[in-house]
Image (cartoon, grey):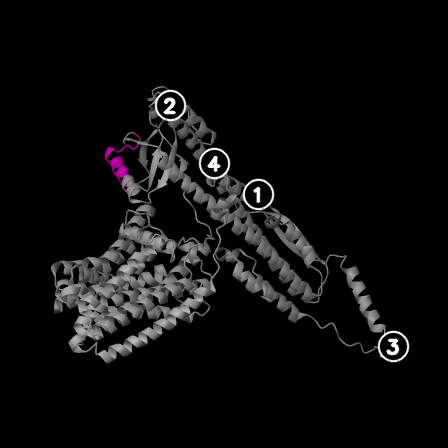
Amino acid sequence: MVKFSKELEAQLIPEWKDAFVNYWLLKKHVKKIKLSRKPKHLPDPNYDFGRSILDPVRVLLRRFTGNAAGNNHEIIQVKSRISTGEDEVVEVYETELVQLFSEEDEVKVFFEMLDDELNKVNQFYKTKETEFLERGEILNKQLQILLDLKRVLADRRRKTTAGGGGSGFTSRSTSSVGRHSDFSESQSEYCDSPNDSQADDVIAALEKNGINFVNSATRAKTKKGKPKMAMRIDIPATTPTRTIAAVTSMLWEDMVNNPKKGGGGEYINRKKIQCAEKMIRGAFVELYRGLGLLKTYSSLNMVAFTKILKKFDKVANQQASASYLKVVKRSHFISSDKVVRLMDEVESLFTQHFANNDRKKAMKFLRPQHHKDSHMVTFFVGLFTGSFVTLFSVYAILAHLSGMFSPRTEAAYMETVYPIFSMFALLSLHLFMYGCNMFMWKSTRINYNFILEFQPSTALKYRDAFLICTCLMTAVVGAMVIHLILLSTGFSPHQVDLIPGILLLCFFLLLICPLNVFYRPTRFCFLRVIRNIVCSPFYKVLMVDFFMADQLTSQIPLLRHMESAACYFLAGSFKTHRYETCKSGKLYRELAYVISFAPYYWRAMQCARRWFDECNVDHLANLGKYVSAMVAAGARLTYARQPSQLWMIIVLVTSVVATVYQLYWDFVKDWGLLKPKSKNPWLRDDLILKNKAIYYVSIALNFVLRVAWVETVMRFNIGMFESRLLDFFLASLEVIRRGHWNYYRLENEHLNNVGKFRAVKTVPLPFRETDSDG
């Protein structure tokens, strides 16, 4: 049977862990009470052993009846008093001992701790309940505004269709410093149209939901004396179109220096209403999720109080749990039914307005089902791992027997095979490291799905990552074996060299395959994130976007291999085996700089966009880190082609500056370490891993792997095979460093969420009131 402490640890909400009953601390104190108990069962020296054999039965009976009589008297009294805080009135529980205990001091401390835990749980529950109730009220108001606007637009379309024409429901575009595409509906456009009754409908609908209008003394009127609206529809600039529109609007406002009077009209069309509807639907889903978490919080804490009081009763040989549990059940976090009623209301509204009264469809959004882990995945991971090891052993033996790495055939074979197969090997290694990351995040209760905003029902699990990795490497090594066998048996090289190209083509087709096979949600999510990265800074930057962009900065060798492979097959070099086309051409040399700079450029543009959205100067400092990395990468690439003393000095200076910059950002900003005043020397106050030595070793390891660029200035005199092998080894070390970095990056993000008790996303809402001066 699983102990409750482990069950509680497995079920509690990680971001709210500090707000739960500290069951482990209370359990330790119960053990202290047990150790401090005075011995009560001493042998009676006056006991007469010659008495009747039924006397022990009578003694037990008397003890039983005595205990039963004693249970009628309460041994503790729990009183509540009202405590006035800074902003609110709080009900505080305090326990008094009515009956003396042999270990009175320990028992008193235990109940004081229990009272503190009960007050903490109550206060947290009230805070979150109030927060979610306020969210519910705001969402209800937003939904009513949306429904009224949809009704008005539907009436307009119907009247326009019936009358053969009509005026447009227009708006004037303004911008909130370019961060959102804001639309301020001005009533003057309605008044210039023949359909003034529609404007009246809009005003009435919006005023009913709190979008108030002021009188003519403080608000300018239109030609016919009707007030201007004071409402905006905030559609976040998450796409290039919205971003460009927001920036253009901001620049226009700067030029005319009067946003209220400038700008042209824009139709409030169905697309904008659909965007608003999608935002409100997402907000309802997050609200329902938060309510479910709060309900789980309440039930788990109730069970924890019950369990710990039963332990106390057993140790103290008293019946205190009944009295205290009555108070717990009367406390707010158990007695309040506001959360349950709000959940029912959300279910009803969501079913009615977002699921066409289909409750089953609504529940798929509100309560997505989590797929259970399949044993078949574990089986195939083992199968493909064994196949990979076997095939790789066969390949090594065949390569040795055929002399494929001899000086005579080394150059041709390495130019053909190395770019493709090393590319897949680096990709597989990265997937393997990501699988290890997910395993560690899950083991240490880091909510990576919430941090990266993945859907739990379709998110990749660590077993799935291992399956993709082993399956991919088995296919790659199998292709290498076939390629080697065909070459050894006398097939034409330009025919055999198609095998790596076919493998690459199959991988690309599988990646974009629209059929729901081989992790389609994950594949499409990956493509969507890559699109957002490449189009930076036009897409709003999410956590998963810059997390993936950081991965790309560690995969520059893979991108270079992709460039070589594309040139090799598109230029027809596999037919002529003229490798200089893709090595010494001017275009190739320029593309090498572009590809080496691209990941750093994308990441720098993301930092610029985040600074633009959030006005946080740290993002500009982070941008400087990637600019320094671009300069260092360009210097090393130039030095590799034009080795000279001057370029060596430039490489040393730029690389040292970039490395120091990166190490500082890794340790201080990304990992949150190196805090001199921390209770854990030079780490941070909160650590998830219990062994502090792991953090010190990780700091040293990250430092060593960050300075691997030193190899580029040492210029070893080795052959082509050894040189390519060394390049692959260094690229693999960088991938391993990135996988190692990933764990601590998300650990720090998780601890930030825990510190703010942030377990639910805050979804932006479309409708808000503004101040308009007419």
Percent coordinates x, y for residue 222 in the rendering: 35, 22
Secondary-structure class at tag 2: helix
Q: What residue sits 35% from the left and 51% below the top?
A: 542
Q: Which mark is residue 51?
A: 3
Q: Label 2: which residue?
A: 162
Percent coordinates x, y for residue 379 in the rendering: 44, 68
Crowdedness of circle 1 by 10 Å Cα count: few (<14), some, many (20+)? few
Identify the mark nearer the N-term, 2 or 3. Answer: 3
Give the main secondary structure of the magenta stretch.
Answer: helix
179 in relation to 491, above or below:
above
Q: Quadrant of the N terminus?
A: bottom right
Q: Label 4: which residue?
A: 141
Name the front one of labels 3 and 4. Answer: 4
Q: Label 1: which residue?
A: 341
Name the front one of labels 1 and 2. Answer: 2
Identify the mark nearer the N-term, 4 or 2. Answer: 4
Name the front one of labels 4 and 2. Answer: 2
Q: Are marks 4 and 2 in contact (CB under 8 Å)?
A: no
Identify the mark nearer the N-term, 3 or 1. Answer: 3
Distance of label 3 from label 1 (alpha carbons): 66 Å
